[in-house]
Image (cartoon, helix red, strand yellow):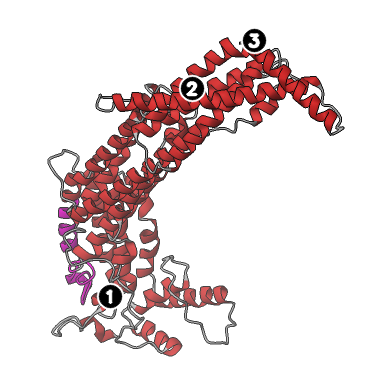
Amino acid sequence: MQGIVSLGVAAAKILVEDISTEYRRRRRTEVNVARERIDTYIRSSLRTAFAQIMEKADSSRRASKNQPNALPLLAILAKDVGSLAVIEKQVFSPILKRWHPLAAGLAVATLHQCYGNELKQFVSGITELTPDAVQVLRAADQLEKDLVQIAVEDSVESDDGGKAIIREMPPYEAEAAIANLVKIWIKTRLDRLKEWVDRNLQQEHWIAQTNQEGYAPSAVEVLRIMNETLDAYFQLPIPMHPALLPEVMAGLDRCLQYYVTKAKSGCGSRNSFVPTMPALTRCTMESKFQGFGKKKEKSPNSQKRNPQVATNGDSSSGIPQLCVRINTLQWILGEFDVLEKRIITLLRNSESAQVEDFSNGLAKKFELSPAACLEGIQQLCEAVAYRIVFHDLKQVLWDGLYVGDPSSSRIEPFLQELERKLMFVSDTVHERIRTRLITEIMRASFDGFLLVLLAGGPSRAFSRKDSQIIEDDFKFLKELFWANGDGLPSELIDKFSTTVRSILPLFRTDTETIIERFRRVTLETYKSSARSRLPLPPTSGQWDPSEPNTLLRVLCYRNDEIASKFLKKTYDLPKKL
């Protein structure tokens, strides 16, 4: 071969010299002629060899088509091209190096280009992640690494360090292609999971199944499918499990957050159940007896509630169903640790995992869904509490407590019904949530008690001697939650009863003192002069013994002549709604 190549190079030189003499051109240097001729020989022979091994690979693929685990054409071709490059480097390049210092580099660059053209066509036709696609792309990636390695070794002594040859080898970007296909796969799986969540939630009745913790079966299914998705992801034959894991985690996190958001939606909140406050009215001495002998007016208590919330015993948001929703979110919250540990195990077993992949714990943690669970549990606890107090026990609290004569419409009926509700909730809700939920019910009860006293409408009126009844009733309400030491801690009860305890002394205070205090704080708050008319303080809803609207409401429900005349003269308040 060396002799034949020498003859070819010599002939090329004679031809160039002859043409140069004929056309009086400046003669090129001898090295360039030889190098150019060898360049042509290498490129044309490698292209021919590539075409031959491509035919051979195609025949091989057709022969093994019906065999299990048959390799796709471009995976066979990558292997054959790699073998050809090694033969070229070992057998032919040492001979050709005499005339071309980068003979091996040029050979592998040519093979790189030939295979690259075939790969480009293949990639343009891929729409989803298949075993064949992954095999081809991984084989292409390995081939490229091998070819580049040969080119680099061959050009160690060259002037430019082989940069010109490497420039002839634009990257296949096989890993990027695999990554894009994996991202499409992830999106498809997550879209399917979200559709499944929607479908299952439509069929979910929020009835506790045969599990001790009383959570919904749809949550078990959601986590089962999430686990299946993780298993399927780690079974993909790809080299970048750790790199794309954050994307899988973020998608699963969003799906679970979506489930949690749907699980708590439409269940209401404090504002959904608390009735609208009736307009301010004043009492007269006779108003005490309006509760008797007369059919009750469409009193304060037929107030409108939020129409978006079902308050008619809707099967999906009754107290038992709300408790199941709470238990479900609590159960999911407990499963995050299990899920995250499982991901670490799957990652450890992954062939592509490196030590540093375990140092960044954030990539393997859920962020949105645990926060959504905590927020959802709080919202549902509030919904249960205010639904019980203002909807389920409406008749004994808002429609019954202190209507007419306070001494004959006391708190006992409300306490009896509330105790039954507390027993049910204690038996139904997860033990880790129990104290929080009962605390919310206590807060709602205290809110309801104050609302009756300060915004109960014209069917209620209190004289100073009624203050003892009110204080005793509130004491009984607190004792229900204390339950002789078996209920909530006394410090917690004291903390939540602070506002009520600060307001109750006003019901003992004489009317003149309250009027005087009301004048003073109103003038201070609204910077009015003593001569001008007192502004009507708006309702803030934040009850406080030194807040103008709170004092005004105590006067509105004060059953004496002085209060009634003051309200008539100052604000011209009516006696009835």
- Dot 2: within a 10 Å radius of its alpha carbon, few (fewer than 14), some, or many (20 or more) residues? many
Q: Quadrant of residue 17?
A: top right
| Circle nearer the N terminus (2, 1) | 2
417 part of magenta stretch: yes
All told, the count of numbered labels is 3
77 and 553: which one is in front? 77
| Closer to viewer: mark 3 or mark 2 | 3
524 and 443: which one is in front? 443
Tell me the kind of residue under disc 1. Answer: Lys
Residue 168 in percent (x, y) is at 63, 31
The residues bearing labels 2 and 1 have C-alpha atoms spaced at a distance of 80 Å
Instruction: Confirm or deny contact between disc 2 and disc 1 (CB under 8 A).
Output: no
Return the residue at label 1.
Answer: 304
The answer to whether residue 486 shows anywhere in this view is no
- Dot 1: within a 10 Å radius of its alpha carbon, few (fewer than 14), some, or many (20 or more) residues? few
Q: Residue at x 65, y 18 (%)?
A: 103
Tell me the kind of residue under disc 2. Answer: Val
Find the magenta span and give its range: 395-422
| Circle nearer the N terminus (3, 1) | 3
SS at mark 2?
helix
110 part of magenta stretch: no
Residue 36 in percent (x, y) is at 71, 25
Return the residue at label 2.
Answer: 81
| Closer to viewer: mark 3 or mark 1 | 3
Residue 311 in percent (x, y) is at 22, 66
Return the residue at label 3.
Answer: 2
| Circle nearer the N terminus (3, 2) | 3
The residues bearing labels 3 and 2 have C-alpha atoms spaced at a distance of 24 Å
Q: Residue at x 28, y 75 (%)?
A: 304
**Residue 463 shown left or right of residue 502 in the figure:** left
